[in-house]
Image (cartoon, rainbow, N blue to C red):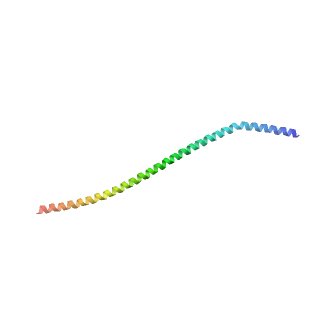
Amino acid sequence: AGLAAGAAGFAAGVTGFAAGVAGFPTGVAGFAAGLAGFATGVAGFAAGVTDFSAGVADFSAGVVGFAAGAAGFAAGVTDFSAGVTDFSAGVASFAAGVAVFAAGVTG
């Protein structure tokens, strides 16, 4: 009885081993596919880091450009104010000239 049970267990073990051998190539293929997917993920992550770094550089350049534009605008406002002052002085000078001319015509 024990021998028969041992023989049956051995047969079951051989069957299980055969199934394991048959499944091993599938497991190896799955592992290889997993490794390939991991490599793709690592490459994608590296590309993402590169893109992020480029984005940070672009943003920094934009901040610098904005600061330069703001400085230029402020300088333009200053120049415009100076122009208004000069124009006002010109108007006053013209009025004085007209007064002198009128005095000359009258005199």
Q: Residue at x 68, y 39 (%)?
A: 27
Image position, residue 69 (x, y; %): 38, 53
- Which of the two residues, 73 or 46, is positioned nearer the viewer here? 46
Q: Quadrant of the N terminus?
A: top right
Image position, residue 60 (x, y; %): 45, 51
The quadrant holding residue 43 is top right
Q: Residue at x 43, y 51 (%)?
A: 62
Q: State the residue lying farthest toward the right.
A: 1
Q: How many marks?
A: 0
Residue 91 shown left or right of residue 9 in the figure: left
Residue 54 shown left or right of residue 73 in the figure: right
Q: Residue at x 81, y 38 (%)?
A: 10
Residue 28 shown left or right of residue 66 in the figure: right
Q: Quadrant of the C terminus?
A: bottom left
Residue 87 shown left or right of residue 47 in the figure: left
Q: Residue at x 86, y 38 (%)?
A: 4
Image position, residue 7 (x, y; %): 84, 37
Image position, residue 98 (x, y; %): 17, 60
Placement of 85 over or under 31, stated as above or below: below
